Amino acid sequence: MTELLAGTASVDITPNLGCHMCGYFTDRVASNIHDPLLVRAIVLRAGDTTLGFVVCDVIDVPVEVVAAAKARIQQLTGVPPQNVLISATHTHTGPSIVGALGTPKEEKYGQDTAPRIADAFAMALQRLQPAQVAMAAGDCTGEVHNRRWHMKDGSVRMNPGYENPDKVRPAGPTDPQLGLMIVRTPQRQPIAVFANLALHYVGVGGSKEHSWISADYFAEFGKALQRCAGAEFTTILANGCQGNINNCDFTKPGRSSPHPYAQIERVANVVAAEAWKVWNTLREEDFRSDVTLDARLATVRFKARTATSEELAKAREQLAGEAKPADMEWAYARELVLLSELPAEWDVPVHALRVGDLGIVGLHGEVFCEIGLDVKARSPFRQTMVVGLANGSAGYIATDKAMDEGSYETRLCRHVRAPKGTGQLWADTAVKLLGEMK
């Protein structure tokens, strides 16, 4: 029987103050650091196969950073790119490793981050020890809400506001499943938890702290779960198909917060408590050391939507006047001009990995939850996690229905370019890869 080995490592990627921060409509500059940003890595080995799961506390890991990190990982360790899944938590209080809307890109930050990702993987590989693994699934229904709503006027609006009398019903479902992969020693000491939940992020709102560097509730989840377990171990909360999901329950009044990070801590505590609960429902025989590891990586063609010549001419005319970065229409006009200078067609990865009876899919963007639910429903594995913002991002990947409905996630700009059919193609490809491994 092949023995399972596991190792973990974390590396600090906190930027300097003064960096641009991505995640809001307009630019922000980091003025303080609330908590550090990390790269967290879990490495598993069984026989000749080594898999790596690496998650970074940034809004996205651009494809060039992923490529550089994976190339260095292969150089240092011999592990091929298809065996390493790299994703982002999607914190909105981190540096602009990518540029979007009114925020410029911090070029050097991405260049500096790539070798740190490789370092985390290499260190985790050096720390391999005998391990057992089990899977579990919890339910976080009360903390995930579809942020797109049908309105009385027939439109669909993102974030319509708390108790808005003009809203009718959510325009889509949620995926409340909290997926867990728990890794421990044969002596029952926790090594790592890899968790997966489709929840965009939990922010600090319009307070001054919105310009403070923070890993958001993703890091708080780890702290809370370690408190529950009474032990130190690596905790990763990988984001899921969250493109239309947030933490705002618009059927109720907005929550009052005693301090800016209260909601972040509250949600992290709820998710960690659910993780701890289902962890403790596992039986001893659920933890296995005789597991099959496998990975598949396919590429599919991405044919981006582009502005028409008329739309582009109108945008250029609007930009010829006074610059108005805070004006939404001016900002979108700028987006059309900028994306006209970018490639309109390229290949994107669809990733699938196997850890025993657990299938893990990596999709390359802010994917709508319906697409992740479809993958899970058709997966041949007993449990499946779908990780978003995996190996980079092509931006929002909406359903065809949502494309017809409109709103923010479908309006053409640099991070909204997917045509109809994209989600279906990615889901079909992922299910095919899962089937090949099963």
Image (cartoon, rainbow, N blue to C red):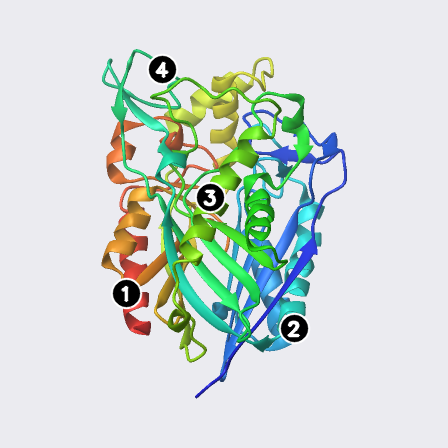
Q: Mark number for residue 271?
A: 3
Instruction: Tell me the crowding category of disc 1: few under 14, some 14 to 19, or many 20 or more residues within 10 angstroms, Cα based.
Output: some
Type of amino acid under label 1: Lys
Q: Residue 35, position in %: x, y?
A: 69, 40
Q: Is residue 162 left or right of residue 127?
A: left
Q: Is residue 321 visible?
A: yes
Disc on the earlier residue, 3 or 1: 3
Q: Is residue 438 above or below residue 384?
A: below
- Nearer to us: label 3 or label 4: 3
Disc on the earlier residue, 2 or 3: 2
Q: Is residue 108 above or below residue 328?
A: below
Type of amino acid under label 3: Val
- Nearer to us: label 2 or label 3: 3
Q: Residue 156, position in %: x, y?
A: 29, 23
Q: Residue 278, position in %: x, y?
A: 40, 54
Viewer-nearest residue: 90 or 300: 90
Residue occupied by mark 4: 163
Instruction: Tell me the crowding category of disc 2: few under 14, some 14 to 19, or many 20 or more residues within 10 angstroms, Cα based.
Output: few
Label pair 4/2, CB-CB below 8 angstroms: no
**Distance CA(mark 2)–CA(mark 3):** 28 Å
Q: Residue 230, position in %: x, y?
A: 60, 55
Disc on the earlier residue, 3 or 4: 4
Residue occupied by mark 2: 127
Q: Is residue 155 left or right of residue 6?
A: left
Q: Is residue 33 left or right of residue 220?
A: right
Residue located at (47% from left, 69% from top): 82
**Distance CA(mark 1)–CA(mark 4):** 43 Å
Q: State the quadrant of the N terminus.
A: bottom left
- Looking at the rendered structure, the secondary structure element under dot 2 is loop
Disc on the earlier residue, 1 or 2: 2
Type of amino acid under label 4: Glu
Q: Mark number for residue 432?
A: 1
